Amino acid sequence: MALDADEEILQDFLVEAGEILEKLSEQLVDLEQNPDDSDLLNAIFRGFHTVKGGAGFLQLDALVNCCHSAENVFDILRNHKRKVDSELMDVVLEALDHVNAMFEQVRHHEEPTPAPEELIAALDALAQPAGESSPANAAVAREEQNESNEASSGGDGGDITDDEFERLLDALEEEKTSSAPVSSDDGNESSGGDGGSGDDISDDEFEALLDQLHGKGQFSGPPETGKAAPDSQDASGDKVTSDEASDSKGGDDLISDDEFEKLLDDLHGKGGSPTAETAKPAPGPAAKQPSATSPSAKADKPAQPTGKPEKAPADNGKAGVTPAMPARDANAPVAETSVRVDTKRLDDIMNMVGELVLVRNRLQRLGAQSEDEHMHKAVSNLDVVTTDLQSAVMATRMQPIKKVFGRFPRVVRDLARSLKKEINLEMHGEETDLDKNLVEALSDPLVHLVRNSVDHGIEAPDVREKAGKPRQGRVTLSAEQEGDHILLSIEDDGAGMDPDVLRRKAVEKGIYEQDAADRLTNTECYNLIFSAGFSTKDQISDVSGRGVGMDVVKTKISQLNGQLSVESELGKGSRIVIKVPLTLAIMPTLMIMLGDQSFALPLVNVVEIFHLDLSKKNIVDGRECIVVRDKVFPLFHIKRWLVKGAAGQPEPENAHVVIVAMGTRRVGFVVDQLIGQEEVVIKPLGRALQGTPGMAGATITGDGRIALIIDVPSLLQNYGK
């Protein structure tokens, strides 16, 4: 193993192979749904081949062997010698799991653990045509596929070995119909199938190969005196004309390094094959030759295989002469348009932009107090520039939600097979971008929600059929941007939720008394699934039943300042919607005053604001409530919780009320004063204040004061009882 190789090379492999392996999981599940998709088969074959090539360069033999066996399976599949079925996909997906495990070991600079021999044997058995199952045939098939894969794997961009080049020559000899006769030894080797490894070809044989690929006259030179062997003639009897020979007088019969490299590109690097090239008609003496500036006359410079001293071809200005090769425009390397940046550096830049936002807010407050017109103009310009800079830096941290969605086809497929259900996963809005920290944080909650839909939502095929539904259930995962928030929804067409069952379970679990449970609305019943320890399953399985998963979802979404809402219809299905901010670094808030202290309410929680005559409040079950548009909202004086000494003060007759939301729950907060909307940068609390109930962090306001950011769910959980 070469894990002590150049760290930059290793990191390049980890980045490239990591992206390929992420795609492979989704592609394999897609292939099971579309087994005849040849483009998909080729893409998966190339994926395993590319990972194998990079691992081979780093001498990661265990990774190479597993990828090679999987690659052979897909070579058989794409040649239509075997059909894709669920059993085959089980083996291939297991192989992918081992490849991923080895890849993680390489990432941590550990020696990769080889895949089990039974798995490799199973792959080798699948890497042969259907109906051939003997170990001997499997070994032969694997060797043949190995040779054909190496000869036909275009696009790797690397040099070919001597053995690979010999195999290319053998393939040409078998297919060509108008080439020069070769020696009996070479013919025997070709017919024997051993690839001709170890025998060199003569100069004349190589010239015949060039004539077949490019036609006479383009790269040909005059034959040397006394060496006009039959091999230098075309099988059809055509010879190089005297005009062509005179046109090529400036050079000899050797090709340049550029021409040889161009030949290798055609055969290997660009994915071409000798048999495909032989189908091209060779240009005759009167055919138009490429000009000095045409792309066909441009090539790179490789090694001379014959070992003879190389002579630079002279440019005599005639069309038949290969001129000095300028740089190829068509194949010129494209300038890099991206650069890899460490995420810590992006975080540092984002923090500095956050500080700039605070300075902007401070200057805006000072500018509003000034009557200087120039001051107002300068502050306005600063506001525009800061906003643009903030957006640009946030864009560098954005990643598509597809990075999370990509794992779910495999999750749904494996879970459906274990539960013996038929489920189709649909995904929409995969290109929706959000902050990289959110992408990582949303991964686990979404896995729990998708597993919940598959296990609890979708019924068994027979049950669906009796209910008049198609046997195959549907789970839809979608994402879209709405303002400065992202909406994620997980929807299924399963059985839906029965509110009466949820009420009964809530009473059994001791969450509610029977009277309180009876008063719950259907929406409140649906939200019971997020309660700790709540589950509708009577038996615990390895999939669900412990009442932990959905509680984890609620906790994580609350930490992200997000909201959860549930919709369901019995017999039709359920839909869970998550609303989270685009970024966690800078938060839009509503600034409020409680006494003489400033607080920030996350704007995502704010529903509406109105002025209230507190004499019109009502008391229900010993709790203050208000009625707004025939809806009842509990009323909380948060000043009593957060400001020292406020509990014994007399209540004002009028106050501002802010209706806040947590999922489907709505409550009213009584505040003394509304300052307005302001973007704030979240700063963590110090060690002495960390973990304070109801506080998410702190920020610096526009007037230079420190304001605490309220964590609405935590505040109600600790004080609202």
Image: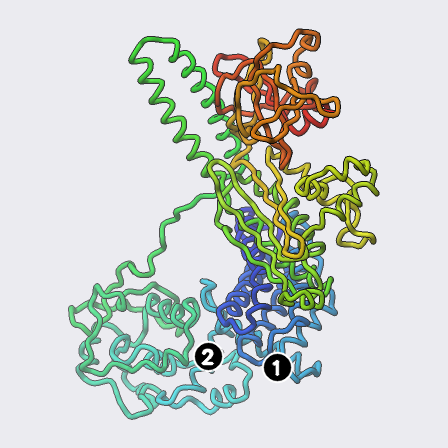
**Is 261 above or below relative to 220?**
above
Residue at label 2? 200
Q: Which numbered disc, 1 or 2, marks the residue closer to the eye? A: 1
Does dot 1 land on a helix, a strand or a loop?
Answer: loop
The residue where tag 1 is placed is 129
Q: Residue at x 48, y 40 (%)?
A: 482
In the image, what residue type sits under mark 1?
Pro
Q: Nearer the viewer, residue 510 or 185?
A: 510
Residue lying at 52% horizontally and 17% vertically, measured from the top left: 674
**Three-letter amino acid code of the residue under disc 2:** Asp
Is residue 584 at least partly visible in the picture? Answer: yes
Residue 431, image x, y percentages: 48, 49
Count residues near mark 1 (Cα–Cα under 10 Å), then give few for <14, some for 14-19, many for 20+.
some
Q: Which mark is residue 523?
A: none
The answer to whether the residues at label 1 and label 2 have Cβ atoms under 8 Å apart is no
In the visual, does 486 lie left or right of 112? Answer: left
Comes first in the chain, label 1 or label 2: 1
Q: Is residue 508 above or below residue 698?
A: below
Q: Determine whether, in the image, residue 236 is placed left or right of residue 84.
A: left
Which residue does the image show at 69% across and 22% down from the upper left? Answer: 690
Q: Nearer the viewer, residue 507 or 332?
A: 507
| Residue 535: image location, x then y, percent | 77, 47
The quarter of the picture where the C terminus appears is top right
**Which element type, helix, strand or loop, lies under badge 2?**
loop
Q: Quadrant of the N terminus?
A: bottom right
Residue found at x 76% / y 43%: 503
Q: Is residue 598 in sight in this rendering?
A: no
Q: CA distance from mark 1 to mark 2?
A: 34 Å
Q: Position of residue 10 (x, y in %)?
A: 56, 50
Residue 657, quarter of picture: top right
Left or right of 358 on screen, residue 669: right
In this view, 90 is above or below 624: below
